[in-house]
Amino acid sequence: MAETKLNPEQINSPTSIAKTEDSASGVATSSLPNDGRAYLRSLLNKTLEVRLTDGRILLGQFLCIDKDANLIIGSAVEYSKENSGEPRTLGLAMIPGRHVTTIWSV
């Protein structure tokens, strides 16, 4: 596993994501510092390991993230202690940002 670690609180903190309104179109947009955007873009379509607050681990392809740090991963597989280490195939999964503890690029 790679040592790249993404902290969801950094993405979702008020200082790193600010909601702005485009004066020309009047459309609300969220902004992320350029280095944060570049990092997230570099993770697109890569395999991520996501640890959740309840101890489960999801492994899948990073497809997108929203302003609330909710993740969408494809071809997701879930590993939990309840299943005795046997993976459970989920397919496309949405993970609420509030349940994410750590994210690794695999």
Image: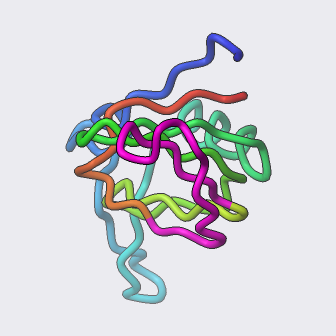
> Which is more toward the observer, 52 or 25?
52
> Which is more toward the observer, 16 or 46?
46
> Which is more toward the observer, 25 or 88?
88
Is residue 86 visible in the rendered image? The answer is: yes
> Residue drawn at (35%, 45%), measured in percent from left and top?
82
Image location of residue 38, percent across then percent down = 67, 38
> Residue drawn at (51%, 43%), measured in percent from left and top?
79
> Which is more toward the observer, 11 or 79?
79
> Residue drawn at (30%, 45%), measured in percent from left and top?
12
Residue 4 quadrant: top right
User: Looking at the image, is 68 positioned above or below residue 55?
Assistant: below
> Residue drawn at (41%, 36%), measured in percent from left and top?
51
Residue 60 as seen in the image, left or right of residue 19:
right
Quarter of the image containing the C terminus?
top right
Residue 60 as seen in the image, left or right of residue 54:
right
Image location of residue 52, percent across then percent down = 34, 42
Q: How are the residues colored?
A: rainbow
Residue range corresponding to the magenta coloring: 76-94
User: Looking at the image, is 96 positioned above or below residue 40?
Assistant: below
Residue 8 quadrant: top left
Is residue 16 visible in the rendered image? The answer is: no
